[in-house]
Structures are given as C-alpha cells and as structure tokens.
Image: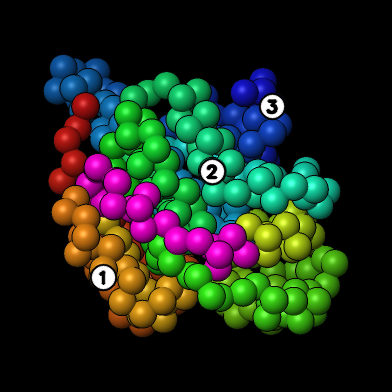
C-alpha cells in the first residue's frame, strides 16, 4: 500500500483517517472506546466495516451511512481501481477489469487494515466483489450486506448503454445539472462521486467491467460464501427476476428482504429502511 496523504477537504474522517494516493482508502473511525471495562469490551464492535461502492460510484458516496455505521465498528471506504479520478487511461487487457482483479485488490486492503475479519457492505458491483472475496478469502470476511446485486446477468450487454453515455457532458456544471440528467437520487450520487463535476474514470472502462457480468455467472462463488449475509433487494431492482430470492434459498447463511418503492440505490432512495435492516443485522453479529 502507498503512504497516506492528506484527507479530502470536508470529507468526514476520524483523527486517524487519511486518504492513500492510489486507493482513496479512508479510515472513518469507530465506536468510542470509553474508559471503563465494559465500554472497553465493546470498543471494537463487530470489527472493521468496509463499504464497497457500485460500478459508477466511489467511496465517498457512502457519506450518509458512515455516521450511524460507526456505532457498530471501525468504518473504512476506498475507491476501486479505475474509480479514483487518477486512472483515466483506457484499459489494454480485459484482465485489468476482471472480477478476480478487484477481489484481489479488496483482499489486499483487508490484509492491510489488519483488524481481523471484516463486515463487507457492498452495493451492486461492490456487492459482487464482497461475496467473491468471502468465498475466496473466508479468513478475511465475517459477514456480508449485499445491496441489489445478483450472480447471473448472462445474455445482457452494455452496448445499449453507449447512446446514453454519449449524451453525457465532459463536465457537469452543478449538482442541479446532474439531477436534471439523472434525477434527484442518482444525480446526487453521481455528482458526489465526480471530481468537481468531471467523471472520475472512463465510461468505456466501466462498461468493460460490466460486460464481463453478461458473459459469466457467479453462482459458484455465492454458494461458497460461509458467513452471515443480508441480501437487500430494491422493488425496482436491476437484478434478474427472482435471483436474489434464489440466492437466499441456496445459501443457508443468508436472508433476503425486498424494499418496497426503492430503486437500485436503496441506501439513498430508502435510507431509513436500509439503515433499519442493516442495524438489525449488525446487532445480531458477535461483538469483539
């Protein structure tokens, strides 16, 4: 891992929180350690909680969830490769954006954090990487929250995204501009991920990441997940019909809920319902 650099201005952080130049890894702190023995016994909560963003997101899009999650453990966010604002070059090898590459990056992050097995909370792409990491590196993961992601998109293609991507400006002039194009919830999400309105990566690279999902499935990885898992599906989901329910039916460690009225960005579209579900799940996990 690289040396720490200065935290981003205005971005919530703990006293120890710094951003790394390569990953944007940020330590947001955790529960108060207190002074008496009982408080100290609960100081670590459920352990580290690592938040994993979606395909066109970024670590800082979790900012509204960080304050309440800190009650349960030490919270970290980081930017996946090709989402840091610094890696704008197009890929030269499909392996650069394979799921295995992102899972290996995540395992490196968890090893570097070195606070024991982590709870992984992943949205969309981040959820896929979370359960694949739990399957491949079970010693590094203690529990999962999977937000609106499924194992099998085979037959779908990102080609239909091209006209939409072509309509994007080089830079969004304001939050209002982004909301005008994407709607209130998604507009805020994207604008928070952008660098002063400019994209934080290459649209073609993000499409290449998703294209892999249309060519293979990840059922075997899901079946291999050995840890407690909460599956949260949006009513207006992007996942194929019935797949998230099937995920719960074939893995005895998991439970599935569907959030009425919510779109793909459940944590922003139905924040209180999302919070209640995740807090109930975390409260049932063993404290350290």
Q: Where is residue 174 in the image (x, y as percent from the top left)?
A: 75, 69
48 horizontally vs 182: left or right: left
CA–CA distance in space, label 1 to label 2:
25 Å
* Residue 281, image x, y percentages: 22, 52
Q: Name the residue under label 3.
A: 5
Please name which of the two marks, 3 or 2, marks the residue nearer to the observer: 2
Return the x and y of residue 198 as percentages of the image width and height. Answer: 79, 60
Tell me if 250 is positioned left or right of 176 in this view.
left
Residue corresponding to mark 2:
100
* Among numbered discs 3 and 2, the one appearing first in the sequence: 3
Q: Residue sitting at 45 percent across and 61 percent down? A: 217
**Front: mark 1 or 2:** 2
Magenta-tinted stretch: 210-229
Between marks 3 and 2, how big is the CA–CA gap?
28 Å
Q: Is residue 86 above or below residue 277?
A: above
Q: Which image quadrant is residue 29 in?
A: top left
Q: How far apart are marks 1 and 3 (CA)?
A: 42 Å
Q: Do the residues labelled 1 and 3 touch (CB within 8 Å)?
A: no
Dot 1: element: helix
Is residue 272 one of those drawn in magenta?
no
Mark 3 secondary-structure assignment: strand
- Residue at x-position 41% and y-position 81%: 236
Q: How crowded is mark 1: few (under 14 residues within 10 Å), some or many (20 or more)?
A: some
In-front residue for pair 105/184: 105
Q: Which circle, 1 or 3, is nearer the viewer?
A: 1
Measuring from the top left, give residue 251's x and y in whole percent: 21, 55
Q: Mark number for residue 245?
A: 1
Q: Which residue is drawn at 66% across and 46% down?
A: 95
């Amino acid at each position: 891992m690289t040396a720490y650099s200065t935290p981003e201005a205005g971005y919530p952080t703990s006293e120890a929180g710094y951003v790394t130049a390569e990953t944007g890894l940020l330590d947001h702190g955790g529960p108060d350690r207190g002074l008496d023995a009982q408080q100290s016994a609960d100081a670590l909560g459920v352990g580290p909680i690592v938040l994993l963003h979606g395909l066109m997101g970024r670590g800082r899009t979790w900012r509204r969830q960080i304050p309440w999650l800190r009650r349960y453990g030490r919270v970290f966010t980081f930017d996946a490769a090709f989402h840091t604002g610094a890696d704008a070059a197009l890929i030269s090898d499909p392996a650069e954006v394979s799921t295995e590459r992102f899972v290996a990056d995540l395992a490196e992050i968890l090893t570097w954090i070195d606070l024991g097995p982590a709870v992984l909370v992943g949205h969309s792409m981040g959820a896929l990487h979370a359960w694949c990491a739990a399957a491949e590196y079970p010693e590094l993961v203690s529990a999962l929250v999977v937000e609106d992601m499924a194992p099998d998109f085979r037959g779908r293609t990102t080609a239909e995204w091209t006209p939409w991507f072509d309509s994007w400006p080089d830079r969004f002039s304001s939050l209002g501009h982004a909301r005008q194009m994407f709607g209130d919830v998604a507009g805020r999400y994207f604008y928070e991920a952008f660098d002063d309105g400019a994209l934080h990566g290459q649209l073609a690279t993000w499409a290449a990441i998703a294209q892999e999902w249309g060519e293979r499935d990840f059922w075997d990885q899901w079946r291999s997940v050995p840890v407690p898992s909460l599956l949260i599906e949006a009513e207006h989901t992007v996942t194929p019909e019935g797949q998230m329910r099937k995920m719960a039916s074939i893995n005895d460690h998991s439970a599935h809920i569907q959030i009425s009225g919510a779109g793909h960005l459940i944590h922003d579209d139905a924040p209180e319902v999302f919070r209640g579900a995740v807090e109930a799940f975390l409260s049932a996990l063993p404290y350290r």
